[in-house]
Structure formats: C-alpha cells, structure tokens
Amino acid sequence: MHLHRSLVGSLCARIQYRPASSPGATIFRSAAVCEHQPQPSAVPTRCGWVFDHIRAPFRLRLLGLVGYHFTMTVLEVIQKSAEYLAKKGLESPRLQVELLLAHALKIPRLNLYLDFERGLSDAEIADVRQMVKRRGRREPLQHILGSTSFCGLEMRVTPAVLVPRPETELLAERAWRFLCIRQASSNMHPDTEPTPEPLPGRGAERGTADQSSPPGRGAGVGSFVENLAQNESVAPAVLDFGTGSGCLAVSIAVNAPAARVWALEISEAALEVATQNAALHHVSDRIQFVQGDGIAALPAGIQFDLIVSNPPYIASREIDSLQPEVRDHDPRIALDGGEDGLNFFRAFAAQAKTFLRPSGKLMAEFGDGQEQAIERLFRDRGWLIEAVGRDYAGRPRILVAQP
Ligand SMILES: C[S@@+](CC[C@H](N)C(=O)[O-])C[C@H]1O[C@@H](n2cnc3c(N)ncnc32)[C@H](O)[C@@H]1O
C-alpha cells in the first residue's frame, strides 16, 4: 500500500523528539504582517477600466500615492511572514506560511500561486497575522490548523492528543498489512472462514458503562468479549493501546476493512478526539473505544490477533530538553515513559501475552536508541522477536514480537 505523506506530515517530521536547538526568540520588528495594525479597507469600487488593467502591485502603489490605505498582496504576506518565522528559527518557514494562509483563506495551498497579486482584506490579514504569531511562539502547526494528515487521512488534532508523527504511519501500514494477509489466508481455509459481525452495543460511542460493565469499559464490551473469546474465526481483532487521536485505530480500520479494533486510552479528552476521527472516516461501527489505565484495564479473557501501540517512551528527565512544540504542547502523559522511557515496554513484556492469541503479534513503536534494551526485556520474558522495523531515516523504531 502506498503511503501518502502530506506536507503537514513532512513538516511534522522535523518536529520530533529532538532537543531544542533553535536560537532564542528575538522580536522581528520589520515583519509587517505581524506588526502591521489593521487599516480600514478602502479599495475603490469605481476606478474604471484603465485602473482595472494596471497590474496589482502598481495599482496598490498608485492608491497609496493618492491617499488610499492599501492592503497587502498574497505574495507580500507570504514573504514577510516567512521572514518572520525564519527569524524565529523555524524550518521551512515559507511552506508553513503558505499552509497557514491557505487555511485562513479556505483555499488549497496551490491556489495561492494562481493569485499572488490578490490584495487581502483587513480581516484576512488579521487572521493570518494571528496564526503566524502563534506559530512564531512555537505552537505546533497542526494545532493551529486543527488537523493533520496521517496515512493520507485527515485527522483532527487538539492539545489533548499527541500530534500524529510520520514515522507512526509505518507502524500503521505494517499493522494493516498483517491483518489483511491474515484475513486473506483464513478466507482460503473454509474451516476458519471469518464471520465478520458488527460490534455489539453502541459501537464507537463510549458513554457511561452499563451496570454490568466494570468502570472504564465502553458500552457493549461484555458481549463483544464473549464473541472474541468463543469464536476464534471472527474477523481479526486489534488492540490499539494508547490511541490518542485514534490515528492508528482509524487508519487500520479504514485499510483493513474486516478488522475490528479496540482503542484503549487513559485520557477522556483524547478519546473524544479519537471518536470524532472515527466518525470522520466512517469506521465508528468497527472501533470500540475504551477508557482505562494500562492493558490490565481490559476485560479478562479478551484476546487479540494484534496489539499495536505507540506508547509514551521518552525518559522523564529528557522531556524538558525537547523542542518547544513537543515539550510545551504535546500532552505530558503521551510522552513520559518513566525514568528510562521503558515503563510501558516492561508492562507489555509482562502482561501482553495473555491478551494475544497464540498466533498473535505485538507491534510497538519505540524511541531512537532503545532497541537493545527493549529486545532484552522481551527476550527475558520469553517473547520471540520477529522483526525490528526502521523509520524513514533508517533507524530501528518498531518492535514486532510474538508471544
Ligand atoms: C505517544 S501517544 C500515542 C498516541 C497515538 N497512538 C499516536 O500514535 O499518535 C501515547 C498515548 O498513550 C496514552 N496513555 C498514556 N498512559 C496510558 C495508560 N496508562 N493507559 C492507557 N493509555 C495511556 C496517552 O494518553 C497517549 O494518548
């Protein structure tokens, strides 16, 4: 399956768990779009044919000479704002400005190129100025835009969730490929032919657990568990541990149409975003959202073909040295993996086997440099390390292990 990496995604690639290295913030006074105060709009309406046929920059200059307040063109806004962001130490400043401006104008980014000389209204300038200022204060681009692209799917993003990262797309792709192959091979053996059924209860709705459900479980969990436990031939079942925005759960559900997904998350606010993303991509009926703390929060007896996770894996002491976009804007609970960053891997190695079918797999993203420690942890607990996947830079980042 071809991976689509969006521009926002590729910008995000540069906002990784790296120590901050950008120079301190300096006030950039000549950044007109950011410092410019709104002027009353005064574009003339009866300037006649001749005026209309003068090229836009000259037209604006002419207006200035005769005392009109002139507005800025698309190109001027891009140039001035890009200068401003560059002075703030941001990478790819022009691309970032174009994305912000296109968002403010509600047009595709490439359409900006068709109309560089268009004058912007005061309201439009005020909008983009505010966005550029936020970005200059190192608020993530994805928070300002309200979404990002993950595996070619739009994902809503709020400060309650980790901004999905491009390297996690590789984990998603590995997961749905495994599920599709598993589904295809069971189709070839009639004895184990899957019998996909809709999820019981309220599907992706979380709501309050009914009285028969223990705290932290979604509605309809009981019968779904029975179904999974009794019938090995049901459609492949996946757990996304720490679903956050739901990027893994949703992209897997979209790309492995027979799969049924459980999405476990400790944060109520994050689950809300994940629920919205499932609805956006019409997979709510195949995802069961569960609020709970740790894998042990899952009902006893439930078993999966695949556990997939991008757990928190930053060592606590390293968090303060991360880039401001990550340190100050990603939820700490999504980053902090304990003293050495490996707390969640210890828990997986100790507890995840009971939640996997014998032929199941665990696929989990880990941090740069954690490979050996994680392999050791899993081997010590009797797991078979099937593979270690690499990220776009060729570094080992994905554990694939069998119980
Ligand atoms: C690194 S984020 C990954 C989010 C998303 N899966 C992604 O790849 O973008 C880890 C997620 O795990 C959640 N989390 C942290 N501790 C948890 C726990 N004890 N039980 C369940 N989820 C937890 C966090 O709230 C966060 O959403």
Image (tube, rainbow, N blue to C red):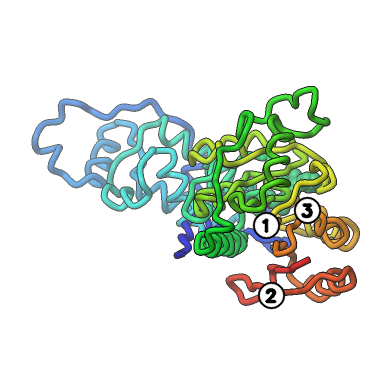
Of residues 145 and 306, the one drawn nearer to the viewer in this rendering: 306
What residue would you read off at disc 2? 387
| Up/down of 179 relative to 136, above or below | below
| Up/down of 101 relative to 364, above or below | above
**Amino acid type at mark 1:** Asp
Disc number placed over residue 270 in the picture, else none: none
**Amino acid type at mark 2:** Ala
What residue would you read off at disc 1? 305
Residue 91 can be seen, yes or no? no
Q: Distance between the residues labelled 2 and 1?
A: 17 Å
Which tag, 2 or 1, sits closer to the chain's start? 1
**Amino acid type at mark 3:** Phe
Which dot, 2 or 1, sits closer to the camera? 1
Disc number placed over residue 355 in the picture, else none: 3
Which tag, 3 or 1, sits closer to the chain's start? 1
Q: How crowded is mark 2: few (under 14 residues within 10 Å), some or many (20 or more)?
A: few
| Up/down of 237 relative to 199, above or below | below
Q: Distance between the residues labelled 3 and 1?
A: 9 Å
